[in-house]
Amino acid sequence: MEKILIIDFGGQYNQLIARRVRECGVYCEVKPYTTPLAQLKAFAPIGMIFTGGPQSVYLEGAPQVDPDIFTWGVPILGICYGCQLMAHLLGGQVTPAQNDSAREYGKTLTHYDTSCKLFQDLPRDGVSWMSHGDYMAQVPQGFSLAARSDACPNVAIADEVRGFYGVQFHPEVNHTEHGRDMIRSFLFAVCRAKGDWTMGNYKDRAITDLRRKIGAGKVLLALSGGVDSSVAAALLAEAVGPQLTCVFVDHGLMRLNEGNEVEEAFSQWNINFVRVDAEARFLLKLAGVDEPERKRKMIGEEFIRVFEEEAKKVGKVDFLAQGTIYPDVIESGAGDAAVIKSHHNVGGLPDHVDFKEIIEPLRMLFKDEVRQLGRELGLPEYLVSRQPFPGPGLAIRIIGDITKDKTDTLRLADFIFRDEMARSGEDKNLNQFFAVLTNTRSVGVMGDGRTYDYTLALRAVTTSDFMTADWARIPYDLLDKVSTRIVNEVRGINRIVYDITSKPPATIEWE
Ligand code: XMP
């Protein structure tokens, strides 16, 4: 399998680079710059990309690579810091930009030398996304200038003989016109990739590998109904069918019909499918609890307890499977970051389940690839394209204490909202949307009578990473339709509000 190696210097777009490469049908992995050269060589890539990073190459302690990497004979594309590092280590000179005009941030008109392989078949001028405060005062021997901006004569450098290319801008971001074409040219014209990495191939290989690894062993997986655990379950079901037990803990805090949909999707495989109806148990535990963090912790703990009890019934298992995906693996640790919410992902590690090893069959895939794999495996579209749903479920969308009535009310209101969004096609423009049952009651009038019912909030956001989000500008007429339907069809709600706060300062969920 042809592979590209992405060497990570800590830039903010590193995952994006990996996704761009994979979109071209070329497999790649991101490895930290501290990885020893021997290990990088063992990976046997056909090309390397050095990412950007927040540092300056000439400062002490700045990330480095083993200079022998340049005599290995593998083509390199350096982006931003990666470009400067290459220039620095190959004898060029990188200095702080002397004046403000040589620092460049944001959209910059750039002029390309289209005889350079990286820019072949592109227009001579285009906008690129710059983000650099350093300047290549002298380019290394063997390199020529391949692009310039009005402020900077050396925006890109190339040594076509050795296959080394460096750009000061970010071709991976959408703001760079033709950025994808540049990455494509590096892969296909410089590294001579064939681009034959597809999800179909991946599926076949993953199934073979899983069979080899698992042998006759038994596998246990906690299925939440979310995309990741569902696809992991489907892949294992395809690989080792009857040896797999999926424990699906239905905590009663799912959306309407969700539990049945999950069960139905897995009826196509001959596996051990255990659905635990734990609604009463969770409601009992949560009765009277209104503090968000307590709710989250209690649900997480209770989930593990139920899972453990079921696991014990299965007996000794050899492997515990999890739906970990690539962004979880390469996301640098949160370190000292403040805990805003204690996220719990269904499938956290239980204490009292005896198993030999953990297997994570989606560990190298991005979310969109996981969805694609799910389709390849024949999972239904409503499951594969499901938007994120928090582990604690509707519990954190009911403000204040939780009762069966409230969960049923919210479930129905949420369903109507989702239904109208899907009918109008507006759901395609949004990354996440849902309803929240507040604990505010207000006076209303229905027919000739007074009502004193709950206020429901609608929330819809657009986001690329869920770290920041913008509230969605849903058409008023659509909001009106949703509002009218909910107050007419759902008892206990007499007022609807729309949340117009972005993240930050709000978070996406209300608790
Ligand atoms: P916030 O509310 O922190 O949410 O802006 C960001 C994204 O994370 C989801 N979320 C969770 N996902 N377990 C999860 O698996 C959780 O406990 C959890 N809490 C929030 C949220 O739906 C949004 O997509």
Image: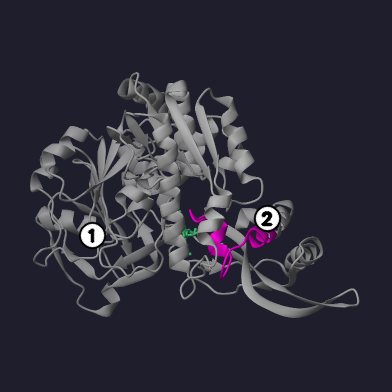
Where disc 1 sits, the SS reads helix
The residue nearer to you, when weighing 332 against 487, is: 487
Which of the 4 image quadrants contains residue 317? Answer: top left
Q: Is residue 156 left or right of residue 429?
A: left
Q: Is residue 402 magenta?
A: yes
Query: Do callouts 1 and 2 mark residues in contact (Cβ within 8 Å)?
Result: no
Check disc 1 and report the residue beneath it. Answer: 81
Q: Is residue 213 left or right of residue 506?
A: left
Q: Amino acid at mark 1?
A: Tyr
Which of the 4 image quadrants contains residue 52? Answer: bottom left
Residue in the image at 62% along x and 62% along y: 403
**Circle 2 residues within 10 Å: few <14, some 14–19, many ≥20:** some
Q: Is residue 93 magenta?
A: no
Where disc 2 sits, the SS reads helix
Check disc 2 and report the residue beneath it. Answer: 418
Residue in the image at 41% along x and 53% along y: 301
The residue nearer to you, when weighing 357 against 459, is: 357
- In the image, the segment drawn in magenta is 389-411
Q: Amino acid at mark 2?
A: Arg
Which of the 4 image quadrants contains residue 222? Answer: top left
The answer to whether 232 is drawn above or below residue 58 in the figure is above
**Circle 1 residues within 10 Å: few <14, some 14–19, many ≥20:** many
Q: Report how far apart the C-alphas of labels 1 and 2 lie in the structure.
A: 44 Å
